[in-house]
Image (cartoon, helix red, strand yellow):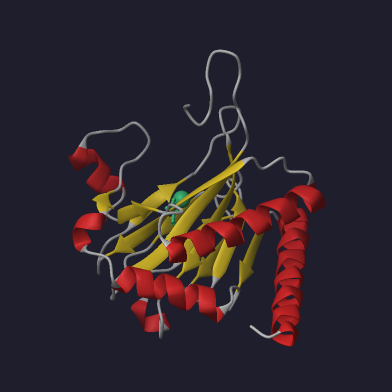
Amino acid sequence: MNPVHETLADAAQSALFTDIAADIRQQGYSVQRDAVPVRLSSGLLYRLANMDTDEFQRAGTGRLQDHQLNAFVRRDRIHWLTNDNPHEQSWLTFAYNLQQFLNRELFLGLFSYECHFAHYRPGDFYKKHQDAFKGQANRILTTVLYLNPDWQTRHHGELVMYHGHGEQPELTRVLPRFGTLVVFLSEEFPHEVLAAERDRYSIAGWYRLNSSHYLRSDPPA
Ligand code: OGA
Ligand code: MN
């Protein structure tokens, strides 16, 4: 990139990070359309297009190993991102930059980030769940980046966020449009993924606290 473009890209990124931090502070969540640089999101799309189906595994829920029970809760297939692939690495770097920014702005003490691609086939879903529970949580902040070009309302597949744990919570619905990024406090927002008419791709990720102590290193050494 030439220096002018680079400066513009940096400015766009700090504007985005500033918006996310303000939203998290005010309401605990943020929904950003066209959030990430197209170079990054299209690289991730390219990566997805060149992956074999056997590089995706059936997703589990916590320590639950019962596949039938799991299939009742969630149907997506996942692939964890690593630094071994350059496109995956670009996303991990972006997430790391956001981590540093949020730690500076909000003193969240985010320590690490883990994330996976998720593929929901038509009709697949993930029932209402929480990514973390008060008291035992080391997942602090959830991110979801959507990678579905030309997604229309009629394709459904919304992320539905429940505001709080009450009987009739307010809902926020997000279409999984290409480049939309959702960030929310993991303990505060139960959420679900509705079935879609099309294949639906995303990267779901979590920032964690460092919960190491003298008996247990986390993540395991
Ligand atoms: C998850 C999740 C949301 C989405 O993987 O825990 O809630 O919209 N994903 O893909
Ligand atoms: Mn979730």
Residue at left offset 30%, top offset 63%: 120
Residue at left offset 75%, top offset 59%: 21
How many labels were placed on the picture?
A: 0
Q: Which image quadrant for residue 33?
A: bottom right
Spot occupied by residue 87 in the image (x, y as percentages of width and height): 45, 66
Spot occupied by residue 95 in the image (x, y as percentages of width and height): 59, 57
Depth check: give the residue in front, 155 or 58. Answer: 58
**Relative to 173, is 126 on the left or the right?**
left
Q: Which image quadrant for residue 157?
A: bottom left
Q: Residue furthest top?
A: 215
Residue at left offset 58%, top offset 77%: 37
Indicate the quadrant containing the N terminus: top left, top right, bottom left or bottom right: bottom right
Spot occupied by residue 177 in the image (x, y as percentages of width and height): 47, 77
Q: Is residue 4 above or below residue 112?
A: below
Q: Which image quadrant for residue 65?
A: top left
Spot occupied by residue 217 in the image (x, y as percentages of width and height): 53, 23
Residue 147 appears anywhere in the view? no
Q: Is residue 17 above or below residue 65?
A: below
Q: Quadrant of ligand 1?
A: bottom left
**Relative to 11, is 158 on the left or the right?**
left
Depth check: give the residue in front, 193 or 111. Answer: 111
Q: Residue furthest front?
A: 2
Residue 197 appears anywhere in the view? yes
